[in-house]
Amino acid sequence: MVKICTKCHNIWPGGFRCPDETCRGALIHTDDARAQELPEAVWRNQRVDYGARRGMVFRFQAGVLAIVLGLYGVRSSVPLESPWNIVGIVGSLVGGALFYYVFHELAHRAVRVWVLRRGQLDKKKLTRALLNQKR
Ligand SMILES: [Zn+2]
C-alpha cells in the first residue's frame, strides 16, 4: 500500500500523517480522487520511479538467467570430447555474458524511451529513438 503526502507529495508506505517532521501533511491513497488532482509532475515522478525499478528488476532477472544458461552450457559441455568441451565451455561463458549484455542494454533503452519520455514521442519517433539511441 502506497500513500502520497498532500503537502510535500512524497510517497510513503502507509500511515496517516507525513513522517517528515517539518511537513506533517495528510497522507492519502494514490487512487484517492484528491490524489488524481495533484499536479502532473507528481505523477511523472511516480512513473519514473516505478519504471526505473521495473528496469532494475528486469536487469536482475536477465543476469540470473544469463548465469543459469551459462552454467548449464558449461555443465553440458564437460562430458564432450576434446577440444569440443573447451569450445563449449568458453562458448557458454561468452554466450551468457553476451545474453546479459543484450538484455541489460534493452532494459536501459526501454526505461529511457518508454518511461522517461512517455507522452513526448509518437510511435515512429519512438521506434527510431529505440534503435538509434546513444547512451
Ligand atoms: Zn509531507
Image (cartoon, helix red, strand yellow):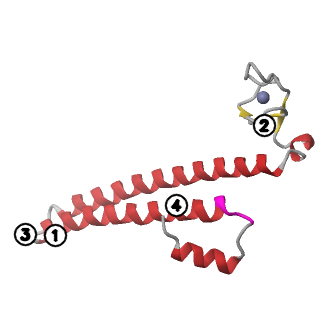
Discs 3, 4 touching: Cβ within 8 Å: no
Depth check, front residue: 41 or 18 = 41
* Side of 112 relative to 77 (left or right): right
Q: What residue does disc 2 label?
A: 9
The quadrant holding residue 80 is: bottom left
Residue 74, compared with residue 7, is above or below; it is below
Of tags 1 and 4, the one toward the viewer is 4
> Quick check: marks 1 and 3 in contact, CB under 8 Å?
no
Crowding around mark 4 (Cα neighbors within 10 Å: few <14, some 14 to 19, many 20+) is many
Under tag 1, what secondary structure?
helix
Q: Is disc 4 in contact with disc 2, using a CB cutoff of under 8 Å? A: no
Residue identifier under label 3: 82
Q: CA distance from mark 1 to mark 2?
A: 56 Å
Q: Earlier in the sequence, mark 3 or mark 2?
A: 2
Q: Nearer the viewer, residue 65 or 117?
A: 117
**Cβ at disc 2 under 8 Å from ligand 1:** yes
Q: Amino acid at mark 2?
A: His
Of 86 and 16, the residue lying toward us: 16
